[in-house]
Image: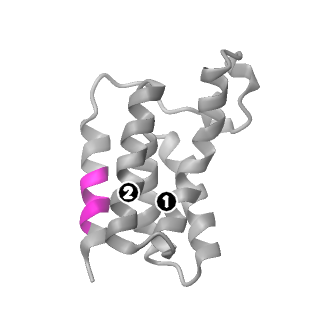
């Protein structure tokens, strides 16, 4: 799953949480669930650019100290291990998270599902 979509999903789900801590955990759990869905990943530069844009948008819409931002961070942080493995050219067997290694969703050619999920999450973030 694209890291930006993880962040948007974590942010949207965190609206159901009462605390920043809960939002962080819900974001991390949403990462695992989203990784199991069929999806297509991008290269590191594209992932970083889109994640920065998503986090910036969430920060502008809800604030950098909001539970939505905490949920976004909780959802995006697990992908740091993907970044490290790719950047250091380590074998994928070094990945710790099971959904990054063993239970990763099947690959797709398109981004339609992720775009739809991102749109739903953005809509949820704009609600009062």
Relative image position of residue 111 (x, y in whole percent): 28, 33
Judge left or right: residue 46 versus residue 102.
left
Mark toward the viewer: 1 or 2: 2
Q: Give the spatial CA distance, label 1 vs label 2.
A: 11 Å
Visible residue check, residue 36: yes
Q: Which residues are magenta?
A: 118-123
Mark 1, Cα crowd under 10 Å, few <14 / some 14-19 / many 20+, is: many
Visible residue check, residue 39: no
Q: The N terminus is located in which quarter?
A: top left
Placement of 6 over or under 107, stated as above or below:
below
Q: Which residue is pictured at 58% across the width and 58% down the height?
A: 74
Secondary structure of residue under mark 2: helix
The one of 32 and 62 positioned closer to us in this rendering = 62
Judge left or right: residue 40 versus residue 127.
right
Mark 2, Cα crowd under 10 Å, few <14 / some 14-19 / many 20+, is: some
Relative image position of residue 84 (x, y in whole percent): 66, 29
Earlier along the polypeptide chain: callout 1 or callout 2?
Answer: 2
Placement of 6 over or under 74, stated as above or below:
above
Look at mark 1 in the image and give the residue it sits on. 72
Look at mark 2 in the image and give the residue it sits on. 56
Relative image position of residue 8 (x, y in whole percent): 39, 56
Relative image position of residue 75 (x, y in whole percent): 54, 54
Judge left or right: residue 43 versus residue 82.
left
Q: Which mark is residue 16?
A: none
Which quadrant of the structure image shows residue 78? top right
């Amino acid at each position: 799953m694209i890291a930006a979509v993880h962040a948007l999903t974590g942010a949207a789900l965190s609206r159901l949480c009462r605390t920043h801590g809960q939002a962080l955990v819900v974001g991390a759990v949403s990462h695992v669930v989203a990784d199991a869905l069929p999806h297509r990943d991008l290269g590191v530069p594209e992932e970083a650019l889109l994640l920065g844009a998503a986090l910036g948008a969430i920060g502008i819409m809800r604030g950098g100290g909001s539970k939505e931002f905490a949920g976004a961070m909780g959802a995006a942080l697990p992908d740091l291990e993907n970044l490290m493995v790719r950047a250091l050219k380590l074998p994928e067997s070094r990945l710790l998270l099971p959904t990054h290694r063993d239970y990763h969703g099947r690959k797709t050619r398109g981004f339609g599902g992720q775009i739809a999920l991102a749109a739903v999450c953005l809509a949820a973030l704009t609600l009062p």
